[in-house]
Image (spheres, rainbow, N blue to C red):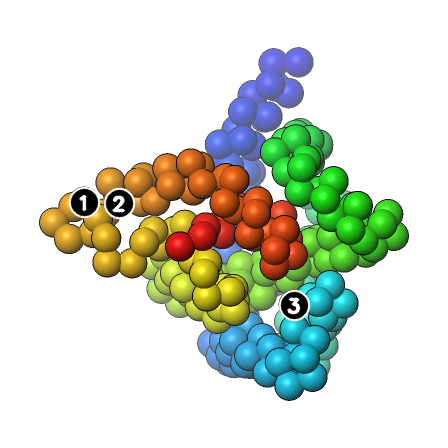
Amino acid sequence: MPSLVTDSLNAHALRFEKPLAPAYDDGAGLRVLVAFILVGIGLPFLLRFAFDATGVRGSPGANLGFVVAWLAAFFLVHRWFVRLPMAAVGPRGPGSWTRRERLYFAQVVPVAALGFAVLFRDHLVALHDRHGLAGFVLFSVVGGLVWGIGQELIYRGWLQTELTRRFGAIAGLLVANLVFTFGPLHFGLPRRTHRCALGRPGRHIRNRPALRHHLRAFRQCVDSGRHARALAAEHELRPFEVVFALEQ
């Protein structure tokens, strides 16, 4: 029992037994970066252009098609162009997980799912009422899971793994997260929205510490929950996008 508690605490502190460093060479690393540029940057723009041209952008079917095409492109490009074992960029089967990794998964997933359901209950009910049970499962549950998996594989698996291999953990993590936050993945929200991470452009930045600015932006997010829910209902944003959407 003490070892179970100790391993659980270490897992929640992200102190896992086997920190795995990338083991591939520079040639493979270059292929990873090229693949990220093509799939992580180029494909989202191409898909959005195609959806705009056909007039379906923003519809539930188009949103689901976007995330499915994006994830499928990752697997195809990884297999035929990157040509590395999947474990080289992060994903490993449960059979190779360590004890702490298993404990972390078993404890975090149920708690996160419960918390998500409680925090976004109203929005989830609205989605269910709008699309029905089958549409809710397909567009919201499956679409949301595919969207999150795609982000992790492309931005964490490809980009973050290669940047940390080339430049070290601190620089690699910083650059990868900057690209994730400010890159093309988060383009395309309606004009009246912005990301809380950015705050309100041009305000409360000059002559103020960056930490204070981000804390203020986060407080604006919390205080603007009603506006975010109204915006979500208007534009059919997914629950995980509601957290970051504010009305200007």
Q: Which residue is mark 3?
A: 58
Q: CA distance from mark 3 to mark 2?
A: 32 Å
What residue lies at 34% left-to-right and 51% top-to-bottom?
A: 199
Q: Residue furthest right?
A: 134
Which residue lies under the disc numbered 2? 213
Q: Residue at x 68, y 35 (%)?
A: 121
Q: How far from the left and from the top, in percent, is residue 54?
A: 69, 84
Dot 1 and dot 2 residues touching (CB under 8 Å): yes
Q: Check whether the beta carbons of the residues at disc 1 and disc 3 lie within 8 A of each other.
A: no
Residue that appears at 74% across and 40% down: 125
Element under disc 3: loop
Residue at 57%, 45% (x, y): give it. 229
Mark 3 residue type: Gly
Question: Is 65 rendered above or below residue 14?
Answer: below
Q: Is residue 19 visible?
A: no
Image spot of residue 40 (x, y percent): 55, 72
Query: Which residue, given by chain and number where applicable, does mark 1 sit on?
Result: 209
Relative depth, front residue between 178 and 198 = 198
Give the structural element (helix, strand or loop) at label 2.
helix
Within-10-Å neighbours for mark 2: few <14, some 14–19, many 20+: some
The image quadrant where one finds the N terminus is top right
Q: Earlier in the sequence, mark 3 or mark 2?
A: 3
